[in-house]
Image (cartoon, helix red, strand yellow):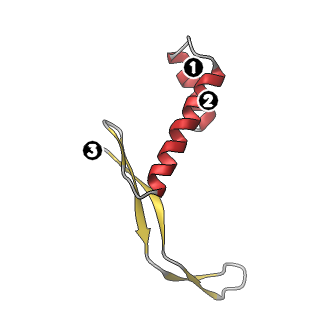
């Protein structure tokens, strides 16, 4: 589901809210999730799953155009685990 589909679906469940209000709320929620992940925090949605930062170790990659070896730095990336 993409963001516009989410906004349309939420508008069906909350007819008293305008599309602009729903869009602003969705943007605020996504912004809070992003900033929490950037700080290294875990975000859990009960009955759905959790987002948390996971570390990817430095590695040697390849440039697909030239085939040349490239050093890729270690970094954190958002990871989602569905609730069982």
Q: CA distance from mark 1 to mark 3?
A: 29 Å
Marks 3 and 2, the one that precedes in the sequence: 2
Disc 2 element = helix
Q: Which mark is residue 11?
A: 1
- Label 3: how many Cα within 10 Å (few below 14, some 14–19, many 20+): few
- Label 2: how many Cα within 10 Å (few below 14, some 14–19, many 20+): some
Marks 1 and 3, the one that precedes in the sequence: 1
- Image quadrant where residue 47 sits: top left
Of the 4 image quadrants, the one containing the C terminus is top left
- Considering every residue shown, the one lying at the far right of the view is 65
- Considering every residue shown, the one lying at the far top of the view is 16
Measured from the top left, where is residue 18 in percent x and y? Answer: 63, 17
- Image quadrant where residue 12 sits: top right
- Considering every residue shown, the one lying at the far left of the view is 84
Give the residue displayed 55% in from the left and 36% down from the top. 28
Disc 3 designates what residue? 84
Is residue 80 found left or right of 34 in the rendered image? Answer: left
Seen from the viewer's position, the closer of residues 40 and 14 is 40
Give the residue displayed 64% in from the left and 21% down from the top. 19
Measured from the top left, where is residue 26 in percent x and y? Answer: 55, 33
Measured from the top left, where is residue 52 in percent x and y? Answer: 39, 55
Give the residue displayed 55% in from the left and 24% down from the top. 9
User: Can you say whether 13 is above or below 38 in the image?
Assistant: above
Q: CA distance from mark 3 to mark 2?
A: 30 Å
Q: Which mark is residue 42?
A: none
Q: CA distance from mark 2 to mark 1?
A: 10 Å
Disc 1 element = helix
Is residue 84 found left or right of 72 in the rendered image? Answer: left
Disc 3 element = loop
Q: Which mark is residue 23?
A: 2
Q: Nearer the viewer, mark 2 or mark 1?
A: 2
């Amino acid at each position: 589901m993409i963001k516009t589909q989410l906004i349309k679906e939420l508008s069906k469940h909350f007819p008293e809210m305008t599309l602009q209000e729903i869009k602003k709320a969705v943007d605020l929620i996504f912004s809070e999730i992003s900033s929490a992940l950037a700080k290294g925090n875990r975000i859990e949605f009960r009955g759905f799953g959790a987002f948390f930062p996971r570390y990817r170790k430095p590695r040697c990659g390849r440039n697909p155009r030239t085939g040349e070896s490239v050093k890729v730095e270690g970094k954190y990336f958002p990871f989602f685990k569905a609730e069982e």
